[in-house]
Image (cartoon, grey):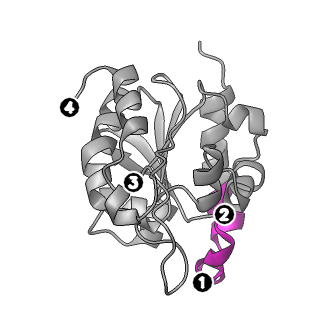
Amino acid sequence: MTSNFAELVKEIKSCRECRGLFGFEPNPVVSGNQNAKILQISQAPSQNVHNTSKCFNDASGRKLRRGWYQIPDEDFYNDNNFYISAVGHCYPGKNPNGGDRKPPKKCADKWLKQEIKLVNSKIIVLIGCYSANYFFPNKDFSELIFDNQKIDDKLTIVLPHPSPSNQKWFKDHPDFEPKRLPEIRKIIHDVLYCPIL
């Protein structure tokens, strides 16, 4: 365990521990700096993120940035605004039954707890049930979304995954977009754009 942020990021990006598990060359993808305002944690990079080494560079990312957060790309990719990580730092490959494979838990156990300790964000945003379950294993996912949470006394927001394949959850929870999402968007905007007094 390192106490140096730059060294931690270097170690994460050079990690190839899951090469044998994946069957292809891992590509750990994280972005942002130690004092980013928001620490955002999702499940794992998509194949497109794996190929481009750019976080949320896919349909889910576009919906998250432009539809849900309603912020320009340059603000999302500003290292001072977001530190972007995941439970699994690499694309884990395709599941034969559809979708992507689940990321190995050992990745989060090795890296994520150190990132949370070293990134001085104002808030944490968890995206998707896999990341929510990692931090809140005994809580109902939908209940986590509709109420603010805390990780290490830090305000934590839980979002469903913005993936186009997640339509059933949105259909089952029609209150999310008209009621909860504006509350979350206001928190995001307040953190990003409110002047420091």
Q: Earlier in the sequence, mark 3 or mark 4?
A: 4
Query: Residue at position x 60%, y 27% from top?
Result: 79
Residue 31 position within the rendered picture, expressed as x and y whole percent measured from the top left: 54, 35
Residue 166 falls within the magenta-colored stretch:
yes
Between marks 1 and 3, how big is the CA–CA gap? 26 Å
Between marks 1 and 2, how big is the CA–CA gap? 14 Å
Element carrying mark 4: loop
Query: Residue at position x 62%, y 40% from top?
Result: 188
Residue 197 position within the rendered picture, expressed as x and y whole percent measured from the top left: 59, 12
Determine which residue is flagged by label 2.
179
Q: Nearer the viewer, residue 65 or 157?
A: 65
Residue 168 falls within the magenta-colored stretch:
yes
The type of residue carrying mark 1 is Asp
The type of residue carrying mark 3 is Val
Determine which residue is flagged by label 3.
87
Q: Earlier in the sequence, mark 1 or mark 4?
A: 4
Query: Residue at position x 41%, y 69% from top?
Result: 102
Element carrying mark 1: helix
Q: Nearer the viewer, residue 19 or 195?
A: 19
Image quarter where the N terminus lies is: top left
Q: Earlier in the sequence, mark 4 or mark 2?
A: 4
Which mark is drawn over residue 172? 1
